[in-house]
Image (cartoon, rainbow, N blue to C red):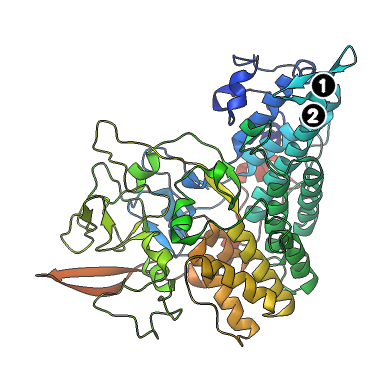
Amino acid sequence: MKSIKKYLFIPVIFLIGICMVSSCKKNPLDRPLELDVQDTTVFKNISYTTEYVTDIYGGVISGYTALGGFTGNNGTMYEAATDDAVHANLSNDSYRYTNGTWGPTFNPDDMYGNSYRGIRKCNVFFENIGKVQVKDHGRDLVINNITATVQRDRLIGEVFFLRAYYYFDMLKRYGGVPITLQSLSLQDDINLPRKTFDEVVKRIVLDCDSAFKRLPDTYIGSATENYYGKGTKWSAAALKARTLLYAASPLNNPGNDLSKWTLAAEAAKPFNDGTTSAMFNLAPGIAGYEGLFKTNTSTNKEIIWSRVATNSNTLESANFPVGEVNGNGGVCPSQYLVDAYEMKDGLPYTTSPLYSAANPYANRDPRFAVSIFYNGSPIKARTIETFDGGLDGAQKSNGTRTGYYMRKHIDPAIDLGAATPGTTQRNWIHFRLAEMILNYAEAVNEAQGPTNEVYTAMNLIRNRVTMPVLPTGLTQVEMRERIRNERRIELSFEGHRYWDARRWNIAKDVFNRKMRGMKIQKTGTTFTYIPYDMEQKVFTENMNRYPFLFFDLQSNPKLVQNPGW
């Protein structure tokens, strides 16, 4: 079984150059280890073992480059493969997901191999961690201001969290997958059958609970502050909450077993009942919301866990409007997403008296202007021109295909034409408090209906950006639609829509329609806004689950392909 061998029998390779924490600089291991380092060497020394665990984080992907990575002009975000956006470059890999040219022969987002490589590293760790030396002549060894015993136990928690992460990464793509809790050898039976969706969920929950018991609340403000970016107690709890929410959702719970929604609500509750209020709170105001994606995540108390990365301006180069020097267009929000933003009075644009067809972007939910570049929005000393013939118009190479560009995550102050263009932080946020609040609202509404707890959670999110509270008396169905729309807006361009539409089993409708943009014409000083249909997107129900690649199926006779592929 060549593919499983490739994923499960890889050599131990230390990529010290990608260390995620500054503690790497203090480590006596200041050079790459030889390939095929013996376990007895790695797991005898607590410093080497720490670096081994750091290496396991290497397979945790960044949402900025989720589809294809920044290879040429192919790297982009998941949103470009949804109804929320398209990519300006027609050769971008995201179009494979919208025109039906992806599948078991080619899938740019296939994570089967990456996940099992991470899982194997976790299993090797568990099999060898008992060998690590924590005392010398009866005295505790010390690493990074803590005892080796404390460090060892914390590392165990991290690896439980990472194994859960890698299994969830496969679960949301493929559904049930083979489970292995040992590093398989050539003598083992490596033709592993798939486990059910619920069996994989159970494994993830067990690992998250094991991690929760062993990890600290935070590293910030402690002697191990330079470990920021590694797993914590609450990142494990957040992963558990998201896993159980997915498990309760219509795609994975077609019989609507309400007990699954109850479990999801219970998992998200500590983020909503005051348990974590000393550690996490919503960044205040629209400035706080905007700053989440441009400031140091280590000091932002809304962020539960982020993937640490070096400062850069690569995202700006890939996604700046084309009127900016060296801007490449990138992710172009759709009219569908724009229409989802309510007016400031809390009403949809179709019924609000605040809406004007001649000035369609005025009086919107404040999150709109900090998430989307639209015709007339400010950037540096000018305004965006997406009208026909404008500086950022569709006629330019890689110009917007929809009339919009992504603003969220982007630092408009960066000047790519300057000798020193500047950089900004690029930590990808995997979990933040707002998601946990919305997870809780969704789970409670599905389990019990629109209770006061649901209203409280939803209004917390809305109050932060001065949006009106929800009207009372909503039915469960009406509240469901409000929750889904709130997620779409609050979590836009954070990779959620791609998975939410699948788990809600609505992707076959919302991803399978003509894309929609805005054509803008300028006559003198007057603009005319004309919504228009674009190309037909393709999404069939089998695409809710990723296919296994033919290579993997041929290598493992017990690996059964997902239906429809």
Q: Residue furthest bottom?
A: 473
Considering only order in the chain, which callout, 2 or 1, is on the residue closer to the N terminus? Answer: 1
User: In terms of depth relative to the viewer, which is nearer, 76 or 240?
Assistant: 240
> Within the image, what quadrant is residue 298 found in?
top right
Instruction: Kindly identify the residue that appears in the image at 80 percent across and 30 percent down.
Output: 150
> Within the image, what quadrant is residue 557 found in?
top right
Give residue 256's position: percent from left, percent from top.
Answer: 74, 74
Give residue 231's position: percent from left, percent from top.
Answer: 68, 41
Q: Amino acid at mark 2?
A: Arg
How packed mark 1 is, by other alpha carbons closer than 10 Å (few <14, some 14-19, many 20 or more), is many
- Horizontal side of residue 115 vs 325, given as left or right: right
Task: Identify whether 30 is placed above or below 315.
Answer: above
Helix, strand, or loop for circle 1? Answer: loop
Split into 4 quadrants, where in the image is the N terminus?
Answer: top right
| Measured Cα–Cα span from mark 1 to mark 2 | 8 Å
Mark yes or no: residue 61 visible. no
Q: Are marks 1 and 2 in contact (CB under 8 Å)?
A: yes
Task: Identify whether 257 is placed above or below 16.
Answer: below
Which numbered dot is residue 132? 1
Helix, strand, or loop for circle 2? Answer: helix
Task: Identify whether 113 is placed above or below 499.
Answer: above
Q: Which residue is denoted by mark 2 in the rendering?
A: 152
Q: Amino acid at mark 1?
A: Val
Give residue 232's position: percent from left, percent from top.
Answer: 70, 43
